[in-house]
Image (spheres, coloured by chain):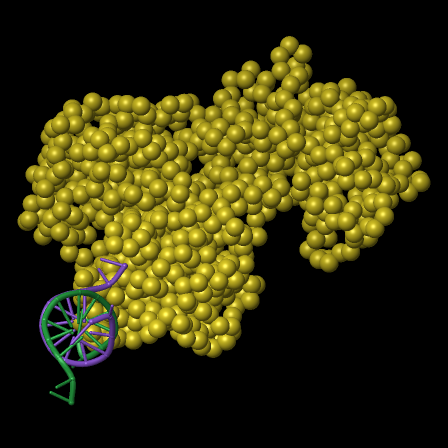
Chain colours: A yellow, B purple, C green
Amino acid sequence: MASYRRRFGWHSHPEVNIFTDRSESSAESLSQAIRAAASEEPDADGSVLFGQLQGNVVGIRHYTGVVNPGEMVALVRQPNNPYDHNAVMVTNADGNQVGHIKKELAAAMAVVMDSNLVKVEGVVPYQTNNAFNMPVTLSFWGTEENNPIFKQRMAVHGYKFNSDVTMTTSYGSQGGRARLPKKPVTTLLSAEELKNAFDDLFDGLVESKDGEKEASELVSTSLMPHQKQALSWMCACENSSKLPPFWEERGGLYYNSLTFFSAKERPQRVRGGILADDMGLGKTLTTIALILTNFHQGMPLPVKRCEGLTETAPSKSEGRVDRTIVGGAPSGSRRPHSPQVVETPAETQEVPIVSKDGKKKKPSVMLEDLDFAAVLGGSTTGTKPKNKRAAKRAVPKDEDPDFVCESTSGAKTKNRVQRAARKALPKEVVEPCIKESAAELSARATLIICPLSVLSNWLDQFEQHVHADVQLSVYLYYGPERNRSVSFLASQDVVLTTYNVLAADHAVATPKNKSPLHVAQWLRVVLDEGHMIRNPNTQMGRAVLQLQAQRRWILSGTPIQNSLKDLWMLLAFLRLKPFNIKEWWNRIIQRPVSQGDRAGLSNLQTLVRCITLRRTKSSTVDGRPLVSLPEKTVCVEQVELTQQERDEYELARLEGQGTISSYMAVGTVLSNYADVLAILMRLRQHCCHPDLLARITSDLSAAGTPAELRARLVEKLRSVLASGFDEECAVCLESVRLPVITHCAHVYCRPCIAKVVASEKEGARCPLCRSTFSISQLVEVPPEELDGEDDGAHGEGWRTSSKVEALLGNLVRIRSEDSSIKSLVVSQFTRFLSILETPLREQGFSFVRLDGTLSQKRRAQVIQEFQSSAPDSPVVMLLSLRAGGVGLNLTAASRVFLMEPAWNPAAEEQCIDRCHRLGQTRNVFVTKFIVKDSVEENMVKIQRGKQDLVEKAFGSKNTDRKASRIDDIRALMDL
DNA sequence: ACCGCCGGGTGCC
DNA sequence: ACCGCCGGGTGCC
């Protein structure tokens, strides 16, 4: 198989991918392009068929690979073949060698293959009855630009491709016939249809015909119906020997309907798949349930249980330990229930051997059969010294925020009983079950690989969802002290590690000193957030692909992010033959689909459907939504300014009103829009805190030198953007992206204004004020600087404001009522967040801050810290409205304080949704602070009005918008 | 005969 | 392979 890996660069290949054009930002598409360029196997997407050739496969009696009529074969170069460096090997879809291409043709093929002019695909068109050779139809694919040189090179060797139907080569009777392909019978899909089909690829994979399955008693949390369905589906994927996709049985033989490959042996299904449920539907819990419920032969994981800690499964065991979570703690992450390091002499660990009679025992018996469990568990479960786990969870169960089932409904317990009764006699589906060999039965451990940011979540979840008396050995393979003993790792129930650790171990591995995670034979490997690995050529990708496991799972809320190629990595990890080989994937799926072939798309859909279960939050079970969110209450809290604040505010308002009315009088409001925005922002900042105004500098007219002007423009642009106004680009009428500011201080998207410049023949004019400008004069703010200011708000000179007091009053009251409640404090002004830090500190609130300046890594740490349920975890998060994406999960908070109104109500909603989302267990209260008799009140009115407007008139024209904006300004300024 | 023809040995790259 | 190719044996009809 090594020869499959031999790939060459394909740098001249243009990145034509209809799917990558969906990206929102250019930074994103650039990184995609870089990722794509790093992939060694060129995509077949842009390939055209150069022509076909009849050739011969020779020497087939020396090899075992069999081929059926019509079967696809692969052509693999063997440059190191001792007899002929031009050798081209032929293999079937299973990777077995069939023979070689006859040497004359191979000599020609070697040239074009080695120079990456073509990809060659073979089909054996019909069966011959001799044991020495067979015919093969070769198809040559490549990019159009390589077509002439390909034909020229082939012609040198006597193989000519005519532009029409047939030809004969001069190479005697071995010469090939070339012909063009038949025209496709069906029409091709349009790019639009294809894109839609692709977007929907993972939709509608809700149905699981496997019904529901109760989790093992070891799981303390009762699963919701959709989680039971997932568990049932996962168990079926692991246990049943249902035929893999595209296989069928015919007369005792097994045929693959795509490759026409056949086998006498029943092909085994991939034991695993992709659980692609939306975030928050409980993929982690379901996976834990799978680990505990489906050990070998569908039996629960045999573990010891301790005395007296459970009402359901009393045990006579001496049980001196409950669960152990051992290993080095992640550096820099302080967890309250820090995993305890336990010295485990690796030499004493043995891979357990299963006793034969164990297989017949019923699960309930097995739980109590400690001897049997001990045999299976080896020495890990009982005999070695272990530290007793720290205290049980501080939060009682019915207050446990993660105890979703119990907290969503008061009558839940009753419901559960009834449901259990209904499902008491499940229809036993007789399905062929996988027979596990003795070697397979010796595997015990599940390896879970996740991003560092969710590592602690897994530990928490194991703690929460596994009965406290269950001695589940979960080893955290992390940190410099991690135990690298393979036998130790293999003897665990669960080994948890991160992609980085896995990749690092793999990278430094030598034949002498191998990566233990890669030597171990895992029962199961689980990739959490599996979309993380998309490129098989990265350290991570390679490390993941080389893990050895019987069962493989991918957990991901977004299995495909950009293109079809993302899916290939997942299939490669699952080892779904033959698609795990890039060549077959390209040939059977990637190229046909990207060229709009309906059959190809249909095959892709079948493929995905066979290995994926995906439910979204809007999916339903038995007509009911999967999960119901707790209630959300939004209220406005009016804030009264102090007399001094009011005086300052009125001063600023009158000044601003004067400026704006004078613009209005001469009709130059829009051409001085940046000034108007600056005035509005100043007023809004007055409403929050006086110190926010400190750094706002003078207006443009004071600018002297060009450098000064430029600096002022940058300042202005920055202040406009920082103001939180969802600035609208007058060209595209969308929110500005890649903002640039003109010398006349109007803000546009860079691409939009570039388009304007290009379209105007003579000097470009600003679309808003018609003043002239050139592209080189455009000023932009370096993205890093957008939220960069963070100064002057601390220390000695600190003063309070009415809004600060209003917030603090709320926070103090909440803390006195229930100190476990966490709050999000949201502002568009990052400097306001800085100001808020001082009183929070003084009042003894532990808090974290999340804004746009944080690195990805730091951001994850902050979120993890805030989401922790530990008693000393932060109770307040200072959150910048613009920070974070839609995916941000802050469900630990149940109170949201919006410090000032946002121009764009959607931004507020999105922010609220960060905590009012799946996983939230408490009722959510949102408080919007609005300063009475101020620009903020006017903004709220306009917000409402805008919402109405958007609903009523969908297609408003540009001029309408302009008019409406002037009206808005009038209303805001009480003019 | 520096050929033609015969028939045995042989057979992927 | 019921072929092609190779190379040794052979040699008028």
Q: Residue furthest top?
A: A796
Which of the pair A337/A948 is nearer the observer? A337
Picture residue at 80% right of the left edge, 40% below the top:
A774
Q: Is residue A780 visible?
A: yes
Figure check: A406 above or below A473: below
Picture residue at 63% right of the left edge, 45% below the top:
A906
User: Does residue A802 appear to the left or right of B10 in the view shown?
Assistant: right
Q: State the count of labels.
A: 0
Q: Quadrant of the C terminus of chain A?
A: top right
Picture residue at 34% right of the left edge, 49% below the top:
A5
Picture residue at 54% right of the left edge, 59% below the top:
A145
Quarter of the image for residue A93 reads bottom left
User: Does residue A481 appear to the left or right of A928 in the view shown?
Assistant: left
- Residue A280, percent from left and from top: 42, 45
- Residue A133, percent from left and from top: 24, 69
Figure check: A601 above or below A802: below
Which of the pair A572/A64 is nearer the observer? A64
- Residue A474, percent from left and from top: 25, 34
Which of the pair A407/A123 is nearer the observer? A123
User: Does residue A445 appear to the left or right of A257 in the view shown?
Assistant: left
Q: Is residue A273 visible?
A: no
User: Does residue A432 appear to the left or right of A838 in the view shown?
Assistant: left
Q: Residue furthest right?
A: A666
- Residue A448, percent from left and from top: 31, 39
